[in-house]
């Protein structure tokens, strides 16, 4: 048995690949490229306070948000590392309006990559954990060129998803539909090593994560659910602990390991909330379901939603299975 502490990401991917005799290795190479992009991004993240990479670029992204320098760097790094790989037919990023074509002189591949290059970027200057979130789909259109149809697939069709979190350590967490595995970057050897095999989220947690500053704008049923969590008549018999970092990937990662529920609902100001279906909700939804958890918009699984546009937003409830089920019961007026 190969020692777990020496199991690299590349070796783990290839051992998983052996389970499928028809595998060509293309998919494994794609994950290798993502890991390398993550290493290059974290190199800049770790020296952000020492070089001129903090602050704003002075530009606005497609979401109408001011672009952070480090956010722009992460976006460019993801594109440059993958557009020449011969593995993709197209890409799409939270940072740009349209799909990102593969350069005309480059080979095309059978996959589509959707990504949030640096989730939580508004917290960069405060040294809060941030991360890269990715979703991989199989190309469905005819011809070599990737088109919008390839990107607008429901989350249940993802072939892989995951994230790289840049915090006190750098971790890559991913799933290909056969469980969830976490790898921690060992900077002394420059390799992601298996540190969290077969991650399983607790069926119920003791943590809830939501922006209580928006409480008055939430629907009355959701307000009742939050009051329920903060009281002592809930399922655990004591108030849930409020833990809200404001960086989705950081809040999600903590709850994945410890259990609990993260919520970014719609409100009277923003009906569909803030988070993006393709770049945030779908990939984290695949991860949480593979770990035994649940994702919902309050009424149905987000992974079943047919996307209409690249930057579609969706209310998000994600985490431990029983906690999300309970949130749905309140939102739907069953409790």
Image (cartoon, rainbow, N blue to C red):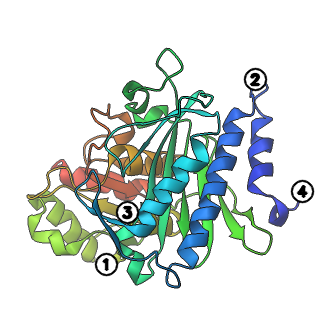
Q: Residue furthest right?
A: 1
Q: Residues within 10 Å of mark 1 (few under 14, many from 20)?
A: some
* Residue in the picture at 25% in, 61% down: 65
Q: CA distance from mark 1 to mark 3?
A: 14 Å
The one nearer the camera, 192 or 122, is 122
Residues at badges 2 and 4 in contact (C-beta under 8 Å)? no
Q: Residues within 10 Å of mark 2 (few under 14, many from 20)?
A: few
Residue underneath mark 4: 2
Q: Is residue 235 left or right of residue 75?
A: left
- Tag in front: 2 or 4: 2
Q: CA distance from mark 2 to mark 3?
A: 38 Å
The answer, for residue 235, to whether it is visible in the render is yes
* Residue in the picture at 60% in, 51% down: 174
Give x and y (percent) for residue 324: 35, 55
SS class, disc 2: loop
- Tag in front: 2 or 3: 2
Residue underneath mark 1: 239
Q: Is residue 90 left or right of residue 35?
A: left
Give x and y (percent) for residue 68: 37, 68
Q: Relative to 3, does residue 91 appear above or below in the rendering? A: above
SS class, disc 3: strand
Residues at badges 4 and 1 in contact (C-beta under 8 Å)? no
Residues at badges 2 and 3 in contact (C-beta under 8 Å)? no
Q: CA distance from mark 4 to mark 1?
A: 43 Å
* Residue in the picture at 58% in, 68% down: 42
Residues at badges 2 and 1 in contact (C-beta under 8 Å)? no
Q: Is residue 55 left or right of residue 134?
A: left
Residue 311, quarter of picture: top left
Residue underneath mark 2: 22
Q: Residue furthest top?
A: 142
């Amino acid at each position: 048995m190969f020692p777990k502490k020496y199991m690299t990401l590349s070796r783990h991917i290839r051992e998983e690949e052996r389970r499928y005799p028809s595998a060509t290795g293309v998919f494994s190479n794609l994950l290798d490229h993502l890991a390398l992009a993550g290493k290059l991004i974290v190199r800049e993240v770790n020296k952000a306070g020492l070089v001129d990479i903090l602050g704003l670029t002075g530009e606005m992204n497609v979401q109408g948000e001011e672009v952070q320098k480090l956010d722009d760097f992460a976006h460019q790094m993801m594109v440059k590392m993958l557009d020449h790989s011969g593995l993709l037919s197209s890409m799409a990023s939270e940072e740009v309006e349209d799909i990102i074509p593969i350069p005309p002189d480059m080979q095309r591949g059978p996959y589509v990559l959707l990504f949030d290059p640096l989730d939580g970027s508004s917290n960069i200057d405060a040294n809060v954990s941030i991360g890269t979130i990715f979703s991989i789909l199989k190309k469905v259109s005819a011809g070599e060129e990737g088109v919008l149809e390839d990107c607008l697939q429901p989350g249940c069709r993802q072939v892989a998803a995951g994230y790289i979190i840049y915090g006190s350590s750098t971790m890559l967490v991913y799933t290909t539909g056969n469980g969830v595995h976490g790898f921690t970057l060992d900077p002394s050897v420059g390799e992601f090593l298996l540190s969290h095999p077969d991650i399983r989220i607790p069926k119920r947690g003791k943590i809830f994560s939501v922006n209580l500053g928006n409480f008055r704008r939430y629907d009355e049923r959701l307000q009742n659910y939050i009051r329920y969590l903060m009281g002592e008549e809930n399922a655990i018999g004591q108030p849930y602990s409020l833990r809200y970092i404001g960086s989705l990937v950081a809040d999600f990662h903590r709850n994945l390991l410890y259990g609990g529920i993260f919520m970014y609902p719609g409100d009277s100001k923003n009906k569909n909330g803030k988070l993006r279906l393709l770049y945030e909700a779908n990939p984290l939804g695949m991860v949480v379901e593979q770990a035994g958890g649940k994702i919902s918009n309050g009424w149905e699984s987000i992974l079943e939603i047919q996307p209409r546009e690249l930057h579609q937003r969706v209310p998000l409830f994600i985490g431990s299975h029983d906690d999300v089920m309970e949130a749905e019961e309140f939102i739907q007026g069953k409790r």
